[in-house]
Amino acid sequence: MCKSCLFGALVLMFACPDADARRRGRSPNNLTVKQKAKKHFKKGQKLFRKKKYAQAIVEFKQAYALRKHPAIQFNLAMSYASVNDTLNAARHIRIYLRTTKKKSKILPRSLRVVQDQTGILIVNTTNPSAKIFVDGALVGKGMVNIVVMIGDHPVDIRLGKRFAARKTIAIKPRQTRVWDVQESLLETPRPRRIITPGRNGHPPLTARRPGAGPEPAPKDSTKHKKLPIRWFVTTAAVAVAAVVAGVGIDQGLTVPLFREYERGGTTDRDLYNKVIAYRNVTISLYAAAGALGIAAAVIALYTKWKKRERAKSAVTILPVLGPRNIAFTLRWEH
């Protein structure tokens, strides 16, 4: 009888925690998860006090993965603000304010500063497959609700490889900006006909393929503008003039003076200096002529040459009677 009482007491002793947990609507496993979350949370608080913010963030995240509590989001926001990660701090502030049950939601100064440096951007599209890019980075599809820094942010909507819409949105402190993309911009465009200049004044019609992307920007004609012919003519004429001047100085002055210098027995120093001076001038003219010739050749590549149509002359010979009174008419063109 005593053994039966002792066994029953042991059963009740081990059954009491389960019964108490069930009476509170919880299981022993949930209590264990809660204890683990509390352990990570306290460890994160200790690391935060020691200013080991990166390690504290890891502990707070592990605690929040075990138990979704607003206090953990508050501590995550404080940790990110301490390492100057403004965007992540602002994201956790939003979660904290949305989930906390406190009536007073006054934040400390460091988190208010984070709020003053960020805003909220919401982009809504009617196509769930539309890719949304903010500042060149993919942030979601269909609809996004994100925290961004204050300032101008280019937003692109893409359908496959096609740019459907683009807009630059200015974000002010604590401001929420919403862009509802028009449904017409997300429709597949129909093929368009682009008229381009053709030959003989007949413009060919070319159809655009569906989904071929935005129309190309018109080409700037000034980038490849041809040079007038007078540039080439002037450069070539100056080059020829330099050659002629060089030849004239060489044959008219340098050579006669040099011969006179040789006949004088190479003792006249002034005459020798004149010969050297004229020879230097001649060499300089030849060098200038060569440089101008190269410049003329380069200019010729970018010169707009006028095509002259060859005039055709025709001679018509009067009809000539042939055998059996057959008339022949001869026409000659060249």
Image: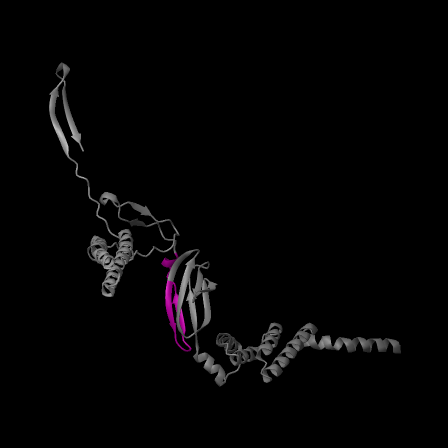
Residue 156 showing in the rendered view: yes
**Percent coordinates x, y for residue 164 in the rendering:** 39, 58
Along the line of sight, the residue nearer the viewer: 245 or 129:
245
Q: Is residue 177 magenta?
A: yes
Q: Residue furthest left?
A: 318
Quadrant location of residue 51? bottom right
Q: Is 30 above or below relative to 333?
A: below
Where is 156 relative to 29, above or below?
above
The answer to whether 95 appears left or right of 34 in the picture is left
Which residue occupies the extreme top position in the image? 324
Q: Give whichever of 282, 312 is nearer the camera.
A: 282
For the N terminus, give its image quadrant: bottom right
| Residue 106 visible in the snapshot | no
Residue drawn at the location 81% of the way across and 78% of the way down: 9
Residue most extreme to the front? 265
Q: Position of residue 45 (x, y in %)?
A: 60, 82
- Residue for point 32% across, 46% down: 206
Place residue 246 in its image quadrant.
bottom left
Q: Is residue 76 left or right of residue 266?
A: right
Q: Nearer the viewer, residue 68 or 238?
A: 238
Taking 20 as reference, is 219 left or right?
A: left
47 in the magenta segment: no
Residue 240: image location, x then y, percent = 22, 53
Pick the residue in front: 325 or 197: 325
- Image quadrant in which the C terminus is located: top left
Query: Residue 219's quadrant in the figure?
Result: bottom left
What are the residue bounds of the magenta stretch? 166-186
Residue 69: x percent and y percent?
Answer: 58, 77
On the picture, is 103 further left or further right than 172? right
